[in-house]
Amino acid sequence: MKKITIKVNGMVCGGCENRVKNAVSSIEGVEEVTANHELGVVTVKANENVSEEAIKNKIDDIGFEVVED
């Protein structure tokens, strides 16, 4: 199991958090997703087969901006 933390712009409410959680949870191998719109952070616990890039792409696909370090 690995833990991935991604910074995300555009989440402004609990509804946004739920959209992100539902989208990322649909990726096979994702075990748990938390999203915090106040901090602009999404944390994902997933098995080793899930790539960080796949998670970022899913977040982009639903209209939120992934912040690259």
Image (cartoon, rainbow, N blue to C red):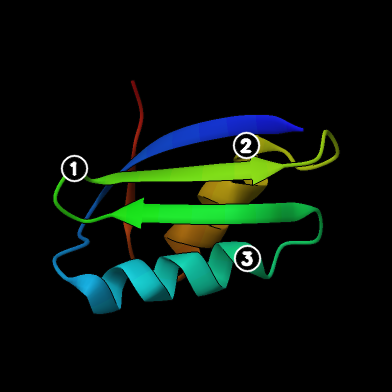
In space, the residues marked 1 and 3 are separated at their CA atoms by 20 Å
The residue at the point 61 percent across, 54 percent down is: 32
- Kindly report the distance in space between the C-alpha atoms of the residues bearing marks 2 and 3: 13 Å
Pinpoint residue 16: horizontal percent, then vertical percent.
28, 72
Tag 3 or tag 2, which sits nearer the N-term? 3
Which numbered dot is residue 39? Answer: 1
Crowd tier of the residue under label 1, counting other residues whose Cα lies within 10 Å: few below 14, some 14–19, many 20 or above: few
Which is more N-terminal, label 2 or label 1? Answer: 1
The residue at 46%/33% (across/down) is 5
The kind of residue on which mark 3 rests is Ser
Per the image, label 1 sits on a secondary structure element best described as loop
Q: Which residue is mark 2?
A: 52
Distance from the alpha carbon under mark 1 to that under mark 2:
19 Å
Residue drawn at x 53%, y 55% as measured from the top left: 33
| 16 over 1 or under it: above or below | below
- Amino acid on which the number 1 mark rests in the picture: Leu
In the rendered view, does 47 fall on the left or right side of 54? right
Q: Nearer the viewer, mark 1 or mark 2?
A: 1
Q: Amino acid at mark 2?
A: Glu
Relative to 61, 63 lies left or right: left
Q: Residues within 10 Å of mark 3 (few under 14, many from 20)?
A: many
Q: Which mark is residue 25?
A: 3
Q: Secondary structure at mark 3?
A: helix
Give the quadrant of the C terminus.
Answer: top left
Q: Secondary structure at mark 2?
A: helix
